[in-house]
Image (spheres, helix red, strand yellow):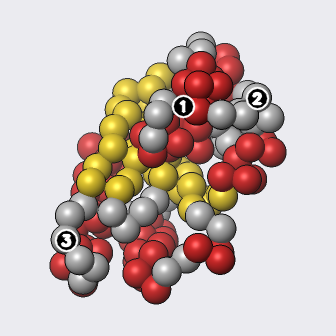
Amino acid sequence: MALKMMRILGISLGTRDCGVAVISDGAIVEWRRHTFHGTWSEDKLHGIIRRLDRYITRYKVTRVMVKIPPVTHHTEAFRALLEKLTEHIRYRGCLMESITKEELKLKVPEIHNKENADGICDRSLSCLANRTGPGKDQQAALTILSV
């Protein structure tokens, strides 16, 4: 399916902060960071899932790309969040792929630092079609580049 026809949600996943970016019909239509306060709990987990689900519903997302930390940095809370998110995305009928920052850098070799990532995010859609700021919202957008 061509990028022009896809609706892709990129997520830079975390238990305190999540960055999101949405490409719909070949254009970035949403790009933001969400912060989730408080200690880890089932309520917090479900709140994060509900917030991310709003993007799937609003934009009728067909594919989800999730940037995750290396396995050695997965806490019990993060593993629970990733498992529940994966289950929810599959329930919604979306294709899902996860990628680490290191894998992302291999797929988009122009990424070297934050300033470089800013420039890549600001490029034209033709750059995004070849495989898609400061912080998690830009990381989510860059995750889409890896598609």
Q: Which residue is mark 2?
A: 110
| Numbered mark located on residue 5 in the image | 1
Front-most of residues 142 and 125: 142
Mark 1 is surrounded, within 10 Å at the Cα level, by few (under 14), some (14 to 19) or many (20 or more) other residues, namely few
Mark 2 is surrounded, within 10 Å at the Cα level, by few (under 14), some (14 to 19) or many (20 or more) other residues, namely few
Q: Earlier in the sequence, mark 2 or mark 1?
A: 1
Q: Which amino acid, mark 2?
A: Glu
The reply, left or right, for residue 132 in relation to residue 48 is right
Instruction: Find numbered disc 1 in the image and state the secondary structure of the residue it sits on.
Output: helix
Q: How many marks?
A: 3
Q: Earlier in the sequence, mark 3 or mark 1?
A: 1
Vertical placement of 41 versus 89: above or below?
below
Q: Earlier in the sequence, mark 3 or mark 2?
A: 3
Quadrant housing residue 129: top right
Instruction: Find numbered disc 3 in the image and state the secondary structure of the residue it sits on.
Output: loop
Front-most of residues 99 and 17: 17
The reply, left or right, for residue 60 in relation to residue 114 is left
The reply, left or right, for residue 55 in relation to residue 130 is left
Q: Nearer the viewer, mark 3 or mark 1?
A: 3
Question: In 3D space, how far apart are the residues under numbered discs 2 and 1 (Cα atoms)?
Answer: 26 Å
Quadrant housing residue 92: bottom left
Q: Quadrant of the C terminus?
A: top right
Instruction: Find numbered disc 2 in the image and state the secondary structure of the residue it sits on.
Output: loop
Q: Which residue is mark 3?
A: 38
Q: Which amino acid, mark 1?
A: Met
Q: Position of residue 71 (x, y in %)?
A: 65, 75
Mark 3 is surrounded, within 10 Å at the Cα level, by few (under 14), some (14 to 19) or many (20 or more) other residues, namely few
Q: Position of residue 90 (x, y in %)?
A: 48, 69
Residue in the image at 54% along x and 56% along y: 66
Residue in the image at 42% along x and 70% along y: 85
